[in-house]
Image (cartoon, rainbow, N blue to C red):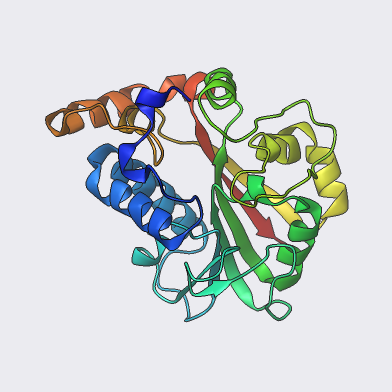
Amino acid sequence: MLAFLREPSLGGMQVGTREYFEAQRRLIQNRPLLKYCYETWYRGMVEAAGGRPLAPRDALELGSGGSLLSEFLDGLITSDVVPGVADCAVDGRRLPFRDASLRAIFMTHTLHHIPDVSCFLAEADRVLKPGGVLAMVEVAHTPFARYFFRHFHPEPYDDQASDWAFRQVDPMMDSNQALSWMIFERDLDRFQKEFPRLRLERKGWLPWLTYLLAGGVTMRNLVPRFLTPILTLAERISVPLRPFLALHWILIVRKR
């Protein structure tokens, strides 16, 4: 990533600390274009789970970090692999919940950080109620996303990997951002055979122009606030371009 594009408010902070996630949360709240993107993501995930309200402790968010999803959903259990930044510390490969006890699992930029994703999917299958959903926002595999995440993002994007698993030392940075495409598009037949009770219900492209111009949660915002209405309109007009330019997609997996 070019140095001048890095968000200065994150300088000197260790990735994965409470301080770091709180700074990212402020970026989402204070950047209108970025907030528009996250609100779009959250509404899509919550609607897939049947909307609000959910019963208390009926839904889990994995990898909460700087997330604002709890503002959209009462009774949400927030979690992260790092202790002290959410309601509880949870490893996605060993979910501390009873069989068929959750109506929904939500994940934003989390799946590609799980080094043994087959183990996680088996756990999701176990803890979800019949009809429950696994709702994810992940990195897309459009031509622009492939270029962007390979050249302007510090985490790996390896769409040539043959295996879903990868070696992990640092849970914040060791990942494969192409993982959702590998599982739910390239290797969809394998997914369906290994997890017959889980069905990919929907894939949908998400806003890209507004996210890019807002700088996401790691880069500078170079857009004046007064341009927000114009750029959100441009985002809506550019919907037909999303199969080529979208940086993220929403994936809804439902348990039979």
128 lies left or right of 86:
right
Toward which corner of the image does residue 97 lie, by quadrant? Answer: bottom right
How many numbered marks are there?
Answer: 0
Query: Horizontal and vertical percent for residue 33?
Result: 27, 37
Residue 145 in sight in this render:
yes
Where is 122 relative to 149, above or below?
below
Q: Position of residue 129 (x, y in %)?
A: 67, 72
Q: Position of residue 182 (x, y in %)?
A: 74, 35
Measuring 80% from the left and 53% from the top, which residue is drawn there? 118
In which quadrant of the rendered view does residue 165 lie? top right
Q: Nearer the viewer, residue 60 or 113?
A: 113
**Residue drawn 69% across the image and 70% down it:** 130
Q: Quadrant of the C terminus?
A: bottom right
Where is 21 relative to 167, above or below?
below
Q: Name the residue located 19 percent from the left edge and 26 percent from the top edge.
A: 230
* Extreme residue in the left direction: 226
Residue for point 36% across, 41% down? 37
Q: Position of residue 254 (x, y in %)?
A: 65, 57
Task: Indicate left or right for 95 with 191 as reference.
Answer: left
